[in-house]
C-alpha cells in the first residue's frame, strides 16, 4: 500500500507541475506576437541534464546498495552455518545446549526479517533483541566449553562465532545506509522543476498532447519509485526476502 501511495503521489505532483507549466506557458507564449524568451532551450537542456545525472547516480547507488544487502544475507547464512558445524569440535556434553541455542537464534533472525516485511517494526525490534540475548548465551556457553576443549577448538570456533555476531551489526547498519535526505530533496525539486519547464514549453502549442504528458509523468514517477524501492527492499515490489531462503536452509539443516 505504501508503495502505491508513493508512486501515486509522485505521479500526481509531476502531472500537476506539467499542467501548471502548460497554463503558464500558454499565457506567456500564446499569440503570434507573443515574445519567446531568449535562452529557454539552454535552460531546459541544463535542467534536464542535471535531472538525468541525478537520476542515474541515485539509481546506480541504490541498486549497488541493494546488491550489497543481498550479499549480506548469504554472508550471514554462511557465518551461522560455519559456526554450527564447528560446534562438533566441542566436548559432546557441551553441544546439546549450544545447538538448541543456535536453533532459537536462527529462528529469531528469520522471524525478525519476516516482521520487517510485514511492517511490524515493534515485533522486528523484539526479535532483534531476543536474538541479541541468545548471542550472549551462545558466546558464554562456547567460552565455557572451550576451556575443556582442545586448543584447536578455541582457535577455530570462537572466530566463527565472532563473525556470526558481527554480521548482525553489519546488516543493521546496511539498512541505515542511504543518501542524505538533502540528495532526495534536490532530486525531487529538480524532477518537479523539470516537469514545470516541460509543461511551459508545451504551452506554446494550442493542442495538448496527453500522450507526452502522461508518458513524462509516469516515467519520472516510476524511476523515483524504483529508486525508493531499492533503498527499502522489504517494503515495496522489489523484495530482498526472496534470497532469505539461504538462511532458512541453514535452519533446516540444524538437525
Image (cartoon, rainbow, N blue to C red):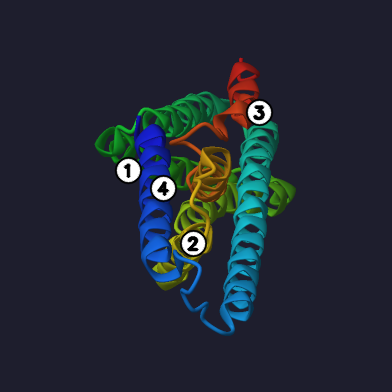
Mark 4 or 1, nearer chain start: 4
The CA distance from mark 2 to mark 4 is 11 Å
Q: Residues within 10 Å of mark 3 (few under 14, many from 20)?
A: some
The CA distance from mark 1 to mark 3 is 22 Å
Q: In the rendered image of this protein, does residue 61 appear above or below residue 84?
A: below
Residue 98 spot, x, y in % from top left: 51, 31
The CA distance from mark 1 to mark 2 is 41 Å
Q: Which residue is mark 2?
A: 191
Left or right of 182 in this view: 45: right
- On the question of residue 149 being in view, the answer is no
| Mark carried by residue 15 | 4
| Mark carried by residue 129 | 1
Residue 144 spot, x, y in % from top left: 49, 46
Foreground mark, 1 or 3, reads 3
Residue at the location (56% across, 35% down)?
238
Q: Residues within 10 Å of mark 2 (few under 14, many from 20)?
A: many
| Mark carried by residue 204 | none
Amino acid at each position: 500500500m505504501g508503495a502505491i501511495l508513493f508512486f501515486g503521489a509522485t505521479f500526481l505532483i509531476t502531472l500537476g507541475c506539467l499542467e501548471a507549466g502548460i497554463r503558464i506557458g500558454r499565457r506567456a507564449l500564446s499569440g503570434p506576437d507573443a515574445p519567446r524568451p531568449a535562452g529557454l532551450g539552454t535552460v531546459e537542456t541544463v535542467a534536464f541534464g542535471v535531472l538525468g545525472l541525478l537520476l542515474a547516480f541515485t539509481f546506480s547507488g541504490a541498486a549497488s546498495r541493494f546488491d550489497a544487502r543481498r550479499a549480506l544475507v548469504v554472508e550471514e547464512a554462511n557465518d551461522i552455518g560455519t559456526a554450527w558445524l564447528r560446534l562438533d569440535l566441542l566436548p559432546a556434553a557441551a553441544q546439546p545446549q549450544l545447538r538448541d541455542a543456535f536453533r532459537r537464534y536462527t529462528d529469531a533472525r528469520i522471524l525478525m526479517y519476516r516482521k520487517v516485511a510485514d511492517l511490524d517494526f515493534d515485533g522486528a525490534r523484539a526479535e532483534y533483541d531476543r536474538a541479541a540475548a541468545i548471542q550472549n548465551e551462545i558466546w558464554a556457553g562456547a567460552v565455557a566449553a572451550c576451556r575443556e576443549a582442545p586448543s584447536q577448538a578455541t582457535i577455530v570456533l570462537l572466530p566463527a562465532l565472532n563473525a556470526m555476531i558481527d554480521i548482525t551489526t553489519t546488516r543493521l547498519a546496511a539498512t541505515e545506509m542511504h543518501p542524505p535526505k538533502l540528495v532526495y530533496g534536490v532530486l525531487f525539486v529538480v524532477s518537479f522543476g523539470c516537469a514545470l519547464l516541460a509543461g511551459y514549453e508545451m504551452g506554446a502549442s494550442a493542442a495538448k498532447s496527453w500522450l507526452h504528458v502522461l508518458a513524462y509523468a509516469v516515467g519520472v514517477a516510476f524511476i523515483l519509485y524504483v529508486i525508493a524501492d531499492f533503498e527499502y527492499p522489504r517494503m515495496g515490489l522489489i523484495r530482498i526476502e526472496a534470497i532469505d531462503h539461504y538462511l532458512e536452509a541453514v535452519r533446516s539443516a540444524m538437525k
